[in-house]
């Protein structure tokens, strides 16, 4: 619609008055008066409209203020923060949280050197434990091991007079295969062994047996280096071991024996045993059995 510029103030006043009436700013009469009223009335209607618009954000602010006054909004945030703090505390290693489940103590290293006493240093088993391990059987082959030897040069009977140990080697020993007056003969054997647990007269004993002799007669448990219970470590002061020669030379013995050293000791624990044979301070023969 095209109106002269002189009529625009009247149109603006009518629009403002209509808006004021729609928002409840006055009665229908006031709206009608506004339509024919002066600019001052239009200003009043405009103020009413402005008040109506201002009331809307004002009411929202009142609701927010009420929330602040009763502290609910702040308390909820604080509760959430407390929950977060509790979760953080629960996961801390010191409080037994999830982090504790991931902490694993490192297992001690396994020592496999048979010359090291720590390779089998657990508590010694007693006769009752040995009988329980047998479970009523007359004998039980527990484990296998090859005898190892090392030597050193000594100038006296005290270890302080000895030099360093030589490199360990598998033990070999020459055994007498024939003796006829002035004629003797020897044959050298390596020493792979079995550790056997057996009973004699109802009492448990350990026997270190050469594999060849065990193959010849597995029931002859006393044909090894025998150890009786009663001391820790168990001791044998005359460590004789028997070897069976399945291929003797003509006119030579097949049933052989040899003295391993001057003193033999056996430390037997629940899952391992360590044999230690000495000849003075210059030689060690050892074996480590795990079962």
Image (cartoon, helix red, strand yellow):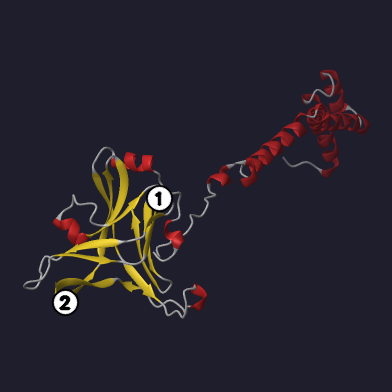
Mark closer to the chain start, 2 or 1 = 2
Closest to the observer: 170 or 8?
170
* Residue 212, x across and y down, in percent: 18, 61
Q: Residue at x 27, y 44 (%)?
A: 199
Question: Does residue 289 lie above or below 183 as drawn?
Answer: above
Name the residue beneath numbered marker 2: 184
* Residue 231, x across and y down, in percent: 43, 50
Q: Which mark, residue 92?
A: none
Q: Is residue 17 visible?
A: no
Residue 230 left/right relative to 65: left
- Tag count: 2
As drawn, the residue found furthest toward the front would be 181
Residue 98 left/right relative to 19: left
Name the residue beneath numbered marker 1: 269
Question: Does residue 200 lie above or below 144 as drawn?
Answer: above
Q: Residue at x 14, y 76 (%)?
A: 181
* Distance between the alpha carbons at the discs numbered 2 and 1: 42 Å
């Amino acid at each position: 619609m095209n109106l002269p510029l002189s009529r625009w103030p009247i149109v603006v006043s009518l629009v403002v008055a209509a808006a004021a009436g729609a928002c409840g700013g006055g009665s229908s009469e006031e709206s009608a008066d506004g339509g024919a009223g002066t600019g001052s009335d239009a200003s009043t209607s405009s103020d009413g409209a402005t008040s109506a618009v201002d009331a809307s954000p004002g009411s929202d602010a009142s609701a927010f203020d009420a929330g602040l006054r009763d502290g609910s909004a702040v308390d909820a945030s604080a509760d959430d923060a407390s929950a977060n703090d509790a979760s953080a505390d629960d996961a801390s290693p010191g409080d037994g949280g999830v982090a504790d489940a991931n902490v694993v103590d490192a297992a001690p290293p396994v020592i496999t050197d048979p010359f090291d006493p720590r390779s089998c240093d657990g508590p010694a088993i007693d006769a009752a434990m040995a009988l329980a391990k047998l479970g009523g059987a007359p004998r039980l082959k527990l484990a296998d091991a090859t005898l190892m030897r090392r030597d050193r040069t000594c100038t006296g009977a005290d270890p302080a007079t000895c030099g360093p140990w030589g490199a360990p080697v598998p033990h070999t020993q020459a055994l007498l295969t024939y003796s006829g007056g002035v004629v003797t003969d020897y044959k050298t054997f390596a020493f792979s062994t079995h550790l056997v647990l057996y009973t004699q007269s109802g009492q448990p004993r350990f026997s270190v047996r050469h594999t060849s002799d065990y193959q010849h007669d597995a029931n002859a448990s006393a044909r090894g280096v025998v150890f009786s219970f009663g001391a820790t470590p168990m001791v044998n002061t005359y460590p004789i071991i028997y070897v069976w020669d399945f291929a003797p030379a003509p006119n030579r013995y097949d049933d052989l024996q040899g003295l391993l050293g001057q003193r033999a000791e056996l430390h037997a624990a629940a899952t391992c045993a360590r044999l230690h044979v000495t000849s003075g301070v210059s030689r060690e023969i050892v074996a480590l059995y795990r079962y």
